[in-house]
Image (cartoon, rainbow, N blue to C red):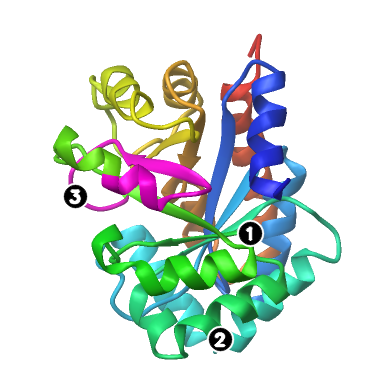
Amino acid sequence: MSRIVQAFARARAEKRAAFVAYLCAGDPDLETSLACCRAVIESGIDVLELGVPFSDPLADGLTNQLAAQRALASGMNRARVFELVRRIREFSQVPVVFYTYYNLVFSHGVDAYVAEARAAGVDGMLTLDLPPEEAGEVQDACRRHGVETVFIVAPTTPESRLPRIVGAATGFIYYVSREGVTGVRDRMADNIPEAVAQIKAHTSLPVVVGFGISTRAQVRTVAAAADGVVVGSALVNCIRDHEGQPEKIVAKLRAVAVDLVAGVRNGD
């Protein structure tokens, strides 16, 4: 049983949604990024989604664009991203899912990239700009090397297309709660329960919801409808707000993560 399957099974047994935390690998530098990953893991998250820094992150809002810029400026590259995962594996078995773009996979060779990711300790891959119709090579490589695949459903996705999307996924389905890019939002979309129910009618895989979730109350609301809740920008902002102060970054990130994770815990 994969670490991803185990994480969602554990959350289900505890009658709660899983908490998925997003951080950009190497933001603001390798050592601080490792400390940030440790902080959110120790806060009680269920899955760590690591953004692979890329120069053209089309699905990301300003917060995550700047995170990628900071990581790239500090010297992050493919080898150092994999190094980060290997170092996380020295102290944690939390599932790690890459949030990446196809050019980063393709340019290295799809099979070689997936094999290297798996060897480092990556459990799943969400390739943002790769639709299932074009994903055969990645799916085959992931199947060969034991890496789960994650695909996105958007608010604009017609129900007729859901079977193809969920059929390509093996790890979980990521429902984007709002049109547009990542980023903190003041208000949640009001149709999340209906959208999740529609997706779940086509799959037994977990459905997680992300994009725009930034407070404990919002986490709690989404957790009532979905199998998992993804928070990214609200965590990445802790790094932005204390840039150049690694100890403050880690302390703030830990405090924010603990507060957000409480939103999926019963009784909080």
Q: Which of marks 3 and 1 is nearer the N terminus?
A: 1
Tell me the kind of residue under disc 2.
Ala
Q: From the viewer's perspective, is residue 14 above or below residue 114?
A: above
> Which residue matches tag 1?
123
Tag 3's secondary structure?
Answer: loop
Asked whether residue 81 is in view, the answer is yes
Residue 21 spot, x, y in % from top left = 56, 47
What segment is highlighted magenta in the picture? 164-183
Tell me the kind of residue under disc 3.
Gly
Residue drawn at 18 percent across, 43 percent down:
179
Q: Earlier in the sequence, mark 2 or mark 1?
A: 2
Residue drawn at 59 percent across, 32 percent down:
18
> Which residue matches tag 2?
112
Tell me, yes or no, whether the highlighted magenta stretch contains residue 30.
no
Residue 245 spot, x, y in % from top left = 63, 66
Residue lying at the far top of the rendered structure: 267
The part of the image, by quadrant, that contains residue 60 is bottom left
> Which residue matches tag 3?
180
Residue 90 spot, x, y in % from top left = 85, 66
Q: From the viewer's perspective, is residue 36 above or below residue 32?
A: above
Tell me the kind of residue under disc 1.
Asp
Q: Which of marks 3 and 2 is in front?
A: 2
Q: Earlier in the sequence, mark 3 or mark 2?
A: 2
Residue lying at the far right of the rendered structure: 91
Q: How far apart are marks 2 and 1 (CA)?
A: 15 Å
Residue drawn at 70 percent across, 80 percent down:
83
The answer to whether mark 3 and mark 1 are in CB contact below 8 A is: no
Give the number of the disc on residue 195: none
